[in-house]
Image: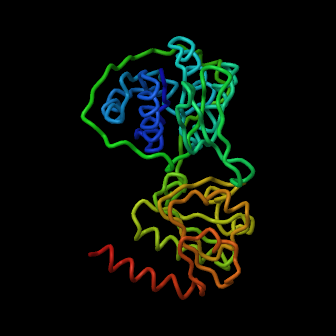
Amino acid sequence: MILVYIEVREGKVKKSSLEALSEGARRAKDFKTEVNAVLVGDKMDNLASEVFPYGAEKIYLLENALFGHYSAESYAQALMTLIEEIKPDVVFFSASAMGKDLSPRVAAKLGVGLASDCTSTAARDGKLEITRPVFAGKILVALTFKSKPQIATLRPNVLPLAEPAAAKGEVIKKEVVIAEDQIKGKAVEVIRGEGAELDVTEAEIVVSGGRGMKGPENYDLLRELTAILPQSAVGASRSAVDAGWIDHQHQVGQTGKTVSPNLYIAFGISGAIQHLAGMSSSKCIVAVNKDPEAPIFKVADYGLVGDLFQVIPHLKEELKKILKD
């Protein structure tokens, strides 16, 4: 059996988790087994209908009033208890911020290995084989597991989301008993910043800026583009973040976030290997830079040598015309 953890944020199921469930359903067919889903939280009955269409045969709802806000300790304990009970062969998480925090805790509690940030899975000779990048994305390694359950996190926006089908299944509610004093730290409230933006790891389009942006005030130009483009977010290179021009949450790269959007637009980013490691799996890369020798052009599908401050206003006007039609 394959078990997929479904992440819920602000009462909504995350698309990246449905991608992981879709991949789990594909592998379940290969192994002639079932794929099930698990949600951890409080009062989640209404979410099951959003999950079944993507292949789950059963949905486990692990509920406790303490699970209203994410807590790594309590969530990991709840998942470990379920996994030890139902004994799945494979457990998938999305490689989101929550998935990267939660999955190693679960693996450590179970005493098994973890493959992180995987970009593909396959069935080989009756075994699960996963592919993941190493050495800043320079090499792709195919691996199999020695321990069970086999736990992996799957990179968002890389694996295809299944076409939803009209489907229903069994909902299994489990009341999880965890003493409040066993949780060393807990969230009591989530306060979003003013003008909080879509996370770059979840965006279909990422518009990034680097040193060529020349200052923090010019990131408003990128935000104007994301206001026009649907499902888009603002990204940044490490140099821009280190300069204090934009928050670290926007950083794309080896020491930031790994993104795989349908479209990645890089303005004023030279393309250091650390940045390329975080965005080279994007489906389409567009680069704008004044330096024709910038490394970013080697990975770009489309490149424009020019001044970004002249390009962005024209691009903004053309996008308004196109999207208006």
**Quarter-of-image position of residue 26:** top left
Please identify the quadrant where the C terminus is shown.
bottom left
Identify the residue at horizontal 35%, vertical 20% (top origin): 171
Q: Is residue 146 left or right of residue 166?
A: right
- Measured along the vertical axis of the image, is residue 208 above or below residue 141? below
Give the residue at the far top of this rendering: 85
Tag count in the figure? Answer: 0
- Measured along the vertical axis of the image, is residue 48 above or below residue 148? below
Residue nearest the viewer, comparing 26 with 127 = 127
Q: Position of residue 57 (x, y in %)?
A: 36, 24
Q: Position of residue 61 (x, y in %)?
A: 42, 22
Q: Is residue 142 left or right of residue 49?
A: right
Identify the residue at horizontal 60%, vertical 21% (top origin): 149
Identify the residue at horizontal 33%, vertical 31% (top origin): 52
Residue nearest the viewer, comparing 161 with 52 = 161
**Quarter-of-image position of residue 181:** top right
Residue nearest the viewer, comparing 135 with 109 = 135
The way the protein has been coloured in the rendering is rainbow
Q: Is residue 171 left or right of residue 300?
A: left
Give the residue at the far front of this rendering: 125
Q: Is residue 77 left or right of residue 167?
A: right
Q: Position of residue 161 (x, y in %)?
A: 40, 45
Q: Position of residue 152 (x, y in %)?
A: 60, 33
